[in-house]
Image: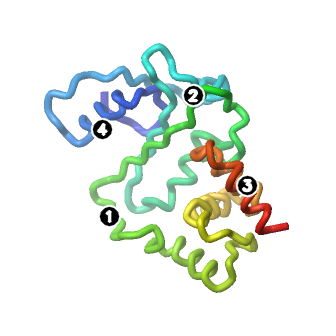
Amino acid sequence: MALREGWYLMSVRDLELELARERGEEGVPESNARPLSIPEALAYRNAGNFPDEHGRTLRLVLRIEPPEGYAALHAKRLSYEPDHLEAPRWRRPGSKPVNVVPLRSAALRTGLEHWWDDPAVGELERAWQRTGEVDGVRVPAEYRSFVYKTVLALRQAGRPVTPDTIADAVARWLPDHAEEIRAALRAANP
């Protein structure tokens, strides 16, 4: 199977096998990865995204191709998971976060050495350096690397940038730290 853009049920081992195949490695055994439609994937997620009998959970494969490149990533994610910037109300004890697998075209090079080298992120960092704020939200220094890409995603989706919308979006990929980040942002923005 060749990885197409879209939803899959995959274990970590399945993902490793599929990425080896993607790199063109020879003799890679078949994985247990199973493609899902958007409605199937969202139903699985809404049921908790618990590992199945093969240890598989949801993975969303997104292809990053020129000319849009990274700029199209958030829009693509929204087309597969329209509520991905909202707090994950489907999470329950034992459920797993959705794992996003961005596959970059070999023709797409970033030339970025550090996260702040990205022009959009660099703009946010410069604003934070001047004011301690990002889009009007005071951000404690230790949380800014979590906040910048989230702010860019919220902007692109046309959503408001507030301590709560930031924490809700962060809860998707940092479930164990989202409430800590929410409390810190709320404390900095009384």
Badge 1 is on which residue?
109
User: Which circle, 4 or 2, is nearer the viewer?
Assistant: 4
Q: Residue 161 in the image: x percent, y percent?
A: 73, 63
Q: CA distance from mark 1 to mark 2?
A: 30 Å
Sequence order check, earlier mark of 4 and 1:
4
**Amino acid under disc 3:** Arg
Q: Quadrant of the C terminus?
A: bottom right
Badge 2 is on which residue?
41
Badge 4 is on which residue?
19
The label on residue 182 is 3
126 and 100: which is toward the camera: 126
User: Which circle, 3 or 2, is nearer the viewer?
Assistant: 3
Q: Residues within 10 Å of mark 3 (few under 14, many from 20)?
A: many
Q: Residues within 10 Å of mark 2 (few under 14, many from 20)?
A: many
Which residue does the image show at 75% across and 73% down from the upper left?
136
Q: Is residue 95 above or below residue 109?
A: above
Which residue does the image show at 74% across and 70% down from the upper left?
137
62 and 182: which is toward the camera: 182
Q: Residues within 10 Å of mark 1 (few under 14, many from 20)?
A: few
Q: CA distance from mark 4 to mark 2?
A: 21 Å
**Amino acid under disc 1:** Arg
User: SS at mark 1?
Assistant: loop
Q: Residue furthest left?
A: 26
User: Which circle, 3 or 1, is nearer the viewer?
Assistant: 3
Q: Residue 15 in the image: x percent, y percent?
A: 36, 33
Q: CA distance from mark 3 to mark 1?
A: 34 Å
Sequence order check, earlier mark of 1 and 2:
2
Q: CA distance from mark 3 to mark 2?
A: 28 Å
Going by the image, does 97 lie left or right of 105?
right
